[in-house]
């Protein structure tokens, strides 16, 4: 009985490790960002990573982007999604009150605006285009 329990523990650890390895080393998706200068930047994104993390990891925007570190305490990671993609993001990452409050401080907000720290990539977002609008936190 004890031997079976130990075997079960090992299996669970291996499964967890496999899942994290798959997320880190697994298949990445293609994403295009339109940066604040209006230039297209094509990158590979890991499913599970936030848009904020991907922007920072790929040095797409460095000055003043995501200054709160993803704590939903500013609007500097404001992004604009394609209308066809916006609803897809709400499935995995539904609106939160904090996100809505912070978007009130963002300039150039549209009906398809989100905060990059609140949206995580999924395989379903393969090939999307994300716009990083000009502007700074209005607080």
Image (tube, grey):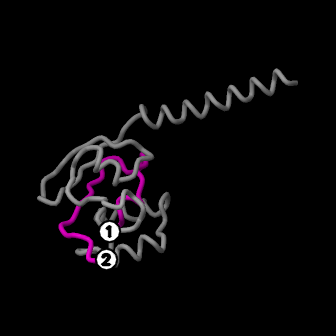
State the extent of the magenta-drawn residues as a range.
113-139
The quadrant the C terminus occupies is bottom left
Check disc 1 and report its element: helix, strand or loop: loop
Q: Which residue is mark 2?
A: 105
Question: With respect to residue 3, does 107 lie above or below?
Answer: below
Q: Which residue is the extreme one toward the top?
A: 3
Give the quadrant of residue 77.
Answer: bottom left
Return the residue nearer the eye: 64 or 16. Answer: 64
Mark 1 neighbour density, 10 Å: few (under 14) some (14–19) many (20 or more): many
The quadrant the N terminus occupies is top right
Q: Which residue is mark 1?
A: 75
Is the Cβ of the residue at disc 2 closer than 8 Å to that at disc 1?
A: yes
Give the quadrant of residue 107.
Answer: bottom left
Q: CA distance from mark 2 to mark 1?
A: 6 Å
* Residue 63 pos. (x, y %): 20, 57
Give the quadrant of residue 67.
Answer: bottom left
């Amino acid at each position: 009985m004890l031997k079976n329990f130990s075997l079960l523990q090992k299996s669970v650890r291996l499964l967890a490790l496999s899942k994290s390895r798959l997320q880190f080393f697994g298949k990445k998706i293609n994403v295009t960002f339109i940066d604040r200068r209006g230039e297209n930047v094509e990158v590979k994104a890991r499913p599970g990573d936030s848009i904020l993390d991907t922007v920072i990891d790929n040095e797409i925007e460095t000055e003043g982007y995501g200054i709160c570190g993803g704590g939903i305490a500013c609007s500097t990671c404001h992004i604009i999604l394609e209308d066809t993609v916006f609803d897809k993001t709400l499935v995995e990452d539904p609106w939160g009150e904090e996100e809505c409050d912070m978007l009130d401080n963002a300039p150039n907000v549209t009906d398809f605006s989100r905060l990059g720290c609140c949206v995580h990539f999924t395989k379903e977002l393969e090939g999307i285009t994300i716009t990083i609008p000009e502007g700074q936190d209005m607080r």
